[in-house]
Image: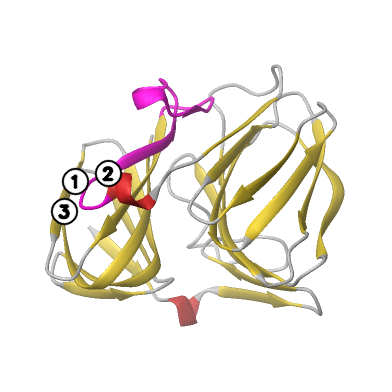
């Protein structure tokens, strides 16, 4: 079963520096029917204004994946990591037993990103962080694994039986994926438009699927896709 989540039906939060859109219940937005998909707990679509961002704050027992759509984000944490992640690239933080970090837009333009939170296999443990470049040309017409629980394809490691993937699909191209029995999938378009099993998705729309499902994606406009497959 595929359930569409149009962008204009997401939860909302806005202040002078952040425009946030919530695919699942988060912060002041609560929908008992949108509490996550399997181990996937959060998918936020954020626009952060220049020279602003999230000041130092703490997390624990969560796998936090950031996919930058446009602009760049600067990360600093209590483990001593500091890095700038650009559009199309990915960073992962395993919060483990606890970590402090900040996420800041040090650019002169707004940064847009997806922030994805996945519950870990086990609570606690040693925190960690990593980032990796994923050139869009390398995922044209095919899936690239950004992060996974088993290090598939030299992907960034996360503490869960999950795969965070992306693909770029040109108009007229087709791409498939099998969600197997007992698993959950969640897909969001970062840009463009596609037909998913006969239903149209536009930029920033989401789609949830539970259990065995054969997915067929057909490009309507050149599209950028981010997808999570998890227990």
Mark 3 and 1 residues: CB-CB less than 8 Å, in contact? yes
> Image point 13% across, 62% down: which residue?
173
Question: Residue 182's image quarter?
Answer: top left
Q: Residues within 10 Å of mark 3 (few under 14, many from 20)?
A: some
Question: Residue 110's image quarter?
Answer: bottom right
Location of the N terminus (image quadrant): bottom left
> Image point 51% across, 47% down: which residue?
89
Secondary structure found at label 3: strand
> Image point 69% across, 72% down: which residue?
109
Residue 214 visible? The answer is: no
Inter-mark Cα distance, 3 to 1: 7 Å
Q: Residues within 10 Å of mark 2 (few under 14, many from 20)?
A: many
Inter-mark Cα distance, 2 to 1: 9 Å
Q: Is residue 53 above or below residue 137?
A: below
Q: Which badge, 3 or 2, is on the more N-terminal residue?
A: 2
Front of the two marks 3 and 1: 3
The residue that mark 1 highlights is: 177
Inter-mark Cα distance, 3 to 2: 8 Å
Front of the two marks 2 and 1: 2
The region drawn magenta spans 140-161
Q: Is residue 142 magenta?
A: yes
Mark 3 and 2 residues: CB-CB less than 8 Å, in contact? yes
Secondary structure found at label 1: strand
Secondary structure found at label 2: loop
Mark 2 and 1 residues: CB-CB less than 8 Å, in contact? yes
The residue that mark 3 highlights is: 175
The residue that mark 2 highlights is: 143
Residue 19 place in picture, x, y as percent: 68, 75
């Amino acid at each position: 079963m595929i359930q569409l989540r149009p962008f204009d039906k997401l939860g909302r939060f806005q202040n002078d520096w952040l425009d946030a859109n919530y695919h699942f219940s988060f912060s002041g937005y609560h929908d008992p029917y949108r509490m996550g998909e399997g181990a996937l707990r959060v998918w936020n679509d954020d626009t952060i204004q220049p020279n602003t961002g999230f000041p130092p704050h703490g997390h624990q027992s969560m796998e936090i994946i950031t996919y930058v759509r446009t602009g760049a984000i600067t990360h600093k944490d209590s483990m001593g990591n500091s890095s700038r992640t650009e559009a199309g690239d990915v960073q992962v933080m395993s919060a483990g037993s606890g970590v402090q970090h900040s996420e800041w837009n040090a650019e002169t333009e707004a940064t847009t990103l997806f922030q994805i939170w996945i519950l870990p296999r086990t609570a606690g443990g040693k925190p960690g962080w990593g980032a990796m470049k994923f050139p869009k040309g390398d995922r044209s017409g095919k899936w690239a694994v950004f992060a996974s629980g088993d290090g598939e394809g030299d992907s960034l490691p996360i503490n869960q039986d999950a795969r965070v993937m992306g693909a770029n699909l040109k108009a007229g191209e087709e791409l498939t994926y099998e969600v197997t029995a007992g698993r959950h999938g969640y897909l969001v378009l970062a840009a463009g438009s596609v037909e998913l099993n006969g239903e149209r998705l536009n930029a920033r729309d989401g789609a949830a699927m539970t259990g065995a499902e054969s997915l067929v994606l057909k490009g309507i406009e050149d599209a950028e896709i981010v997808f999570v497959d998890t227990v």
